[in-house]
Amino acid sequence: MATVSDTSNLNTEYEAVVVGAGPAGVTCVGNLLERKVAPILWVDHDFNGGRVNSKYREVPSNTKAALFIDFATAVAPFRKIVSGTPSRSRWEEPSGSDGVSTDDKPDKLQSLRQLDPQKGCELSYAADMIMMLTEGLKKTPGVTAVRGNVSDAQLFGLTEQWNVNVQGHKKSADPAEAFSATTERLILCTGSSPTDTPLPGNTKDIPHFDLDDALSPSKMSARLSGLGPTTISVIGASHSAILVLRNLYNLASSIKPDLKIRWLTRHELRYAEFMNGWILRDNTGLKGEVAVWAKEHLEPENFKKSDVSKYIDAITYEKGKDEATFEKHLPGSDFVVQAIGYQRNATPTLTTTDGKSITPYYNHKTGGFEYDSGSKTDRTKLPGMYGAGIAWPERVTDPHGNVEYAVGFFKFMKYIKRVSPEWN
């Protein structure tokens, strides 16, 4: 079924309501369909692939191209959309085992298969793959896709079902009319956005340069190339921060030599390291071409002799000294970019049917939620509500005891494959 705006003929009862159509939403819909959970109500603003497609197409991936192929062939509903598969991924079964014949059908993953499978790629390839799967899932029997927002939901305590209220999203090209539906499973794949906090004291009036735009070389060039001498301060040392620094350096060393960059960081660069069968700092360390660039140009032993030092002024400071450092070094900046992490997007307002507010607490091992139910125990399981994606990731512990949160297409798939069979 295609995306609908006329809700007058929609069902009022669904086995699952999935909120969000980025990579995590696509993952959850595919896994639910594979488990024969239907009908599914799928709600999103525009079904445009989430931030990865709308914001990050120019960003180099941390993921090998082979893992994007594995993601796209991980469940039978995906394989039916992909159609022809001349080479199988680790997830695929022999031809015909899931009712998919590969004879005389185009392989919709050819653009990915033509890449070096052991190297990363621009996220445009992954975004196009997500859009291909999204369009296929929207046409899959058992899926009703509606443009809009889930504004709020009420938990029926006796039946442990949710009443979900959907409002048409004003910015959508074809917004849905308001309607309500009940479901046994409410699944939040609502995503996250860059953290952009107010700056202290004499730095509070410095204009903020949006991180999403700073991660796009074309948007950065369009915004800065016509300006006069410009100073931009970048805060952070994450993958995003280093990518911003590289984008700014490339602009300064080519068409905007009057661009000056201040880089403020409170810790040394950290890299993902391949160990014996696992990866240290797999989710927090620098990877791929960004890691290579950082080692060649930003490490102290290379920085002064690198061309980047002509444009970048590196400023290190201790944790807890943020305010003093910012007040000393940020004045004079035309813009500041905060690459300091991501925060969850807004989620539906949750209440019980008698009007009591529900504050959900995510369980990073099961994908479910808990809440304060008023019982003698501190918290109890919140019936029928689950989450996935960058806002609700799996918590993992490596062999050295380091705790991280697993974010990435393939990581979402592995997590949802593991936990969703228990989403009853």
Image: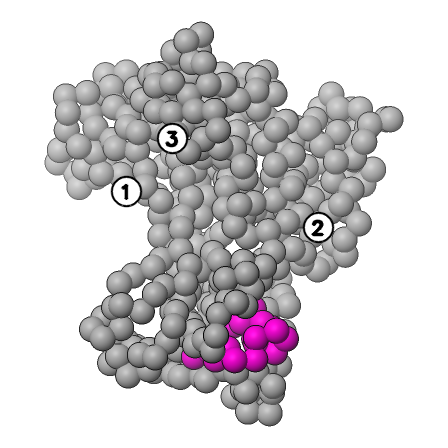
- Give the residue type that dot 2 points to: Ala
The image quadrant of residue 221 is: bottom right
Describe the element under mark 2 as helix, strand or loop: helix
Seen from this angle, which residue lies furthest right?
A: 104
Instruction: Return the x and y of residue 137 as percentages of the image width and height.
Output: 59, 26
Q: Which residue is mark 2?
A: 66
Q: Is residue 398 visible?
A: no
Q: Is residue 112 visible?
A: yes
Residue 212 lies in the magenta stretch:
no
The first of marks 2 and 1 along the sequence is 2
Q: Which residue is mark 3?
A: 170
Residue 208: mark in rendering: none
Describe the element under mark 3 as helix, strand or loop: loop
Neighbourhood count class around disc 3 (C-alpha, 10 Å): few under 14, some 14–19, many 20 upward: few
Q: Which residues are magenta?
A: 244-262
Q: Which residue is mark 1?
A: 361
In-front residue for pair 362/97: 362
- Give the residue type that dot 3 points to: Lys
The first of marks 1 and 3 along the sequence is 3
Q: Residue at x 39, y 29 (%)?
A: 169
Real-space CA distance between mark 1 and mark 3, rounded to the nearest whole angstrom: 29 Å
Neighbourhood count class around disc 1 (C-alpha, 10 Å): few under 14, some 14–19, many 20 upward: some
- Give the residue type that dot 1 points to: Tyr
